[in-house]
Amino acid sequence: MEAADSQLVDLLRVLEELKSSAAAVQARAAAVLDASQRRAQSRAGVPAAHLGRGVGAQIALARRDSPHRGNRHLGLGKALVHEMPHTLAALASGVLSEWRATLLVRETACLDLEDRHRVDELICKDPDSLDGVGDRKLIARIRSITQAIDPASQVRRHAKAVSDRYVSCRPAPDTMCFVTGLLPVAQGVAVYAALSRAADSLRASGDARSRGQIMADTLVERVTGQAAADRVPVEVQLVITDRTLFTGRTLFTGRHGETVPGGDASPGRTGAPVAPVAPGRLGRVGAPVAPGRLSGVGVPVAPGGPGRSGTGSLGTLGPWDAGGTAGPLGGSGRDAPAYFPGYGIVPGAWARDLILSALGLGNNQQPCPAAAGRQESPPGAGDGAGAGAPASPPPDEQRTPVTLRRLYLDTVSGELTAMESKARAFPAGLARMIRTRDQTCRTPWCDAPIRHIDHIEPHAEGGRTSYANGQGLCEACNQAKEAPGWNSSSTPVSSRRNDVSPRHTVRTTTPTGHTYSSMAPPLPGAASAIGGAS
């Protein structure tokens, strides 16, 4: 037993060294590919400022990684091969891991070439000196040497760090998210101190929320300019089918007598879904809607759901059969999920609660945390107020803007109804449909938010401004495909039930002739959602 365990430990060490050696080979290959592609692009007449465009994207596709990491792999390879030979040798021998080689490259990025060579030699020429050195000790060693060699490099590092400030949003479990700001230290401390003072003040005045809740709500209110954190505007994109649309039932009756399809006014249902709303819209003034069911459109708004605070625009809600039949995943339509742009799939119940909270509807609805600790007016305050009754804010202040937008779904293919335009740029409605379909950047292994709506077949080459010929891309991927040698084509969507790939598919061919496919993710509740995204 002991001998076997010893061999397993030795195997782990050998495999780790093998990983480092493979990373060194990848670094060399990336640098050689970059040089070759630059020569090819130069011969093709690409301006010098654009040479190398798309190389990082090719590396990312080959390594099944995001374009951002592909560019990082490329930068690491070029630095190791051309500027830091001792670090590359330590990586190839298994002494350094790929991550620690990345730290060496990152921490010396502000040095000139000669000083970078010196740091590389002082730290990595003797591999034994790296034995037992962790990440923090390695960084401390690099910085002490760079400070002695070039004190001005620290000033340059600071200036570069300030220029790299940003704000990001990342999904977190349980329908939460991380909004992170990388700020200069003085500004970051000032922001935190302001939120802390606001929390301490409200807590001292009797606010029932926790300190962390107050700070989070205050951040939302001050950034968005809203009076309350739970009053974020909500746009509900309801995906419905033709079968649902023509059932003869109605969702709401408009103020001018018009009907919004997809609701349920049949006897025996809970709550009569009648409300004064304009066609296709739950009014900018948050028109009151009686508790009822959005049956036929994916997310039934059931009475009595807890009132959770809405924190953004709600995206696509899956199709819901007008008769309340079981969904494609085996549960009832009430269990169909929803898609929240910038986050991902969320539970249908959470989506219903978000809508109810925004509209101020639902029986037994609990106050949201942002409102729970707010003070009530003294008894008798306000005109016509009963004894001890809290003063109610004006109706417009009680309502949150909620917009209803209907999108129609083919029940067989799971695709939205197509549309096209004769314009070169994608109109807002068509661009919205493509964003709803694609959800994130269509490049394989890239989960970045969509920034550009791109013609798959270029418009200059006769590509149409249509639903089928459009794809959502992040800015980096859209720029990468503009390099010579990149080609894309779309596979037409088929409504045949035996078609193994009914969803919109894009095939991308890189300058080296490698082809990668990207299939649009299934919309919540569509029959194709069972198999998952390709």
Image (cartoon, helix red, strand yellow):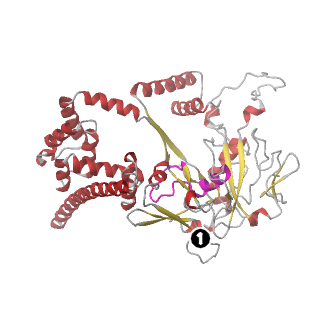
* Residue at 54% over, 24% down: 198
Residue 202 shown left or right of residue 4 in the figure: right
- The image quadrant where one finds the N terminus is bottom left
Residue 448 locus on image (x, y percent): 48, 50
Residue nearest the observer in this picture, 4 or 234:
234
Q: Which residues are drawn in magenta?
A: 428-451
Q: Relative to 534, does residue 136 appear above or below in the rendering?
A: above
Q: Position of residue 464 (x, y in %)?
A: 62, 60
In the shown orientation, is residue 69 left or right of residue 324?
left
The local secondary structure at tag 1 comes to loop
The three-letter code of the residue at mark 1 reads Pro
Q: Is residue 212 visible?
A: yes
* Residue at left offset 83%, top offset 57%: 265
**Residue drawn at point x = 18 percent, y = 42 percent:** 120
Q: Residue furthest right?
A: 257
Give whichever of 80, 124 is nearer the camera.
Answer: 80
Q: Is residue 445 magenta?
A: yes
Instruction: Pinpoint residue 233: horizontal percent, then vertical percent.
Output: 66, 40
With respect to residue 307, does 18 lie above or below? below
Residue positioned 26% across, 47% down in the render? 79
Query: Quadrant of residue 49 in the image?
Result: top left
User: Could you classify mark 1 by the number of other residues whose Cα lies within 10 Å: few (under 14), some (14-19), or many (20 or more)?
Assistant: many
Residue 485 position, x and y percent, is 42, 61
Assess whether residue 372 is covered by the magenta stretch: no
Left or right: residue 62 versus residue 414 is left
State whether residue 498 is above or below residue 35. below
**Total number of numbered discs in the rendering:** 1
The reply to whether residue 301 is visible in this rendering is no
The residue tagged 1 is 502
Q: Is residue 350 left or right of residue 126?
A: right
